[in-house]
Image (cartoon, rainbow, N blue to C red):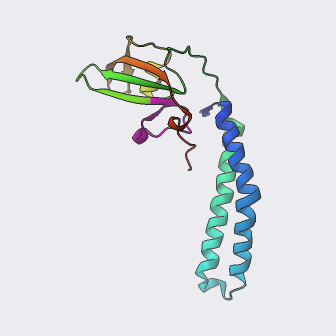
């Protein structure tokens, strides 16, 4: 399965790749070079740590490049009053009457602890393209429950999360 990403996600991933290649990589390569000169590599903790940091940076670059290469670019054409990517949605759980507010984002930005749910999650799929006052069945595979969309509004830039760092 390919991740569904917006053009904005891809632009931010490319910025991170460029930063890691032009700023971080030269710094960690210099650190590896300096720590290598400290002597016996088998007992040189600083050298092994520098290599670990270098490898993590290179791994992150490869991950982001693979994500961009295999991504399904999506456009969210939801109307202003419809739930979709970049929208803040307040839902009422009909079984207990509780309300929660979530921002619908792409998989690379999801963070349920911060109220960011993926458009591909069961709740995200269920409420997408629905308006305030409509109900939706959320099917989790093991169970299902009903929600009512209470409010849909545009989320601010700071409410849409940052790219997850794997």
Residue placed farthest to the bottom in the image? Answer: 39
The image quarter containing residue 41 is bottom right
Name the residue rendered at 70%, 38% in the picture: 11
Give percent across and percent down for residue 123.
42, 25
Magenta stretch encompasses residue 68: no
Q: Is residue 85 above or below residue 78?
A: below
Q: Is residue 40 above or below residue 7?
A: below
Q: Please tell me how many numbered marks the rendered image carries.
A: 0
Give percent across and percent down for residue 122.
43, 26
Magenta stretch encompasses residue 111: yes
Q: Is residue 57 visible?
A: yes
Q: Is residue 142 above or below residue 132?
A: below
The answer to whether 138 appears left or right of 42 in the picture is left
Q: Is residue 49 above or below residue 20?
A: below
Considering depth in this image, is 143 or 91 the residue closer to the camera?
A: 91
Q: Is residue 142 visible?
A: no
Give percent across and percent down for residue 86.
54, 27
Give percent across and percent down for residue 85.
54, 26
User: Where the N terminus falls, by quadrant?
Assistant: top right
The answer to whether 58 appears left or right of 127 in the picture is right
Name the residue rendered at 53%, 39% in the picture: 161
Which span of residues is magenta-colored? Answer: 103-118
Considering depth in this image, is 125 or 130 the residue closer to the camera?
A: 130
The answer to whether 69 appears left or right of 108 in the picture is right
Name the residue rendered at 53%, 35% in the picture: 160
Residue placed farthest to the left in the image? Answer: 96
The image quarter containing residue 73 is top right
């Amino acid at each position: 399965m390919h991740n569904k990403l917006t053009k904005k996600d891809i632009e931010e991933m490319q910025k991170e790749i460029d930063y890691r290649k032009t700023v971080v990589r030269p710094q960690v390569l210099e650190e590896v070079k300096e720590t290598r000169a400290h002597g016996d590599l088998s007992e040189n903790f600083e050298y092994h740590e520098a290599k670990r940091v270098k490898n993590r940076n290179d791994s992150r670059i490869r991950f982001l490049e693979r994500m961009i290469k295999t991504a399904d670019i999506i456009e969210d054409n939801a109307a202003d009053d419809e739930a979709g990517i970049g929208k803040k949605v307040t839902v009422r759980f009909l079984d207990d009457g509780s309300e929660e507010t979530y921002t619908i984002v792409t998989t690379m930005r999801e963070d349920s602890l911060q109220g960011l749910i993926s458009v591909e999650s069961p709740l995200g799929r269920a409420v997408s393209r629905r308006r305030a006052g409509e109900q939706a069945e959320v099917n989790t595979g093991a169970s299902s429950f009903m929600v009512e969309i209470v409010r849909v509004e545009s989320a601010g830039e700071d409410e849409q999360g940052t790219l997850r760092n794997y």
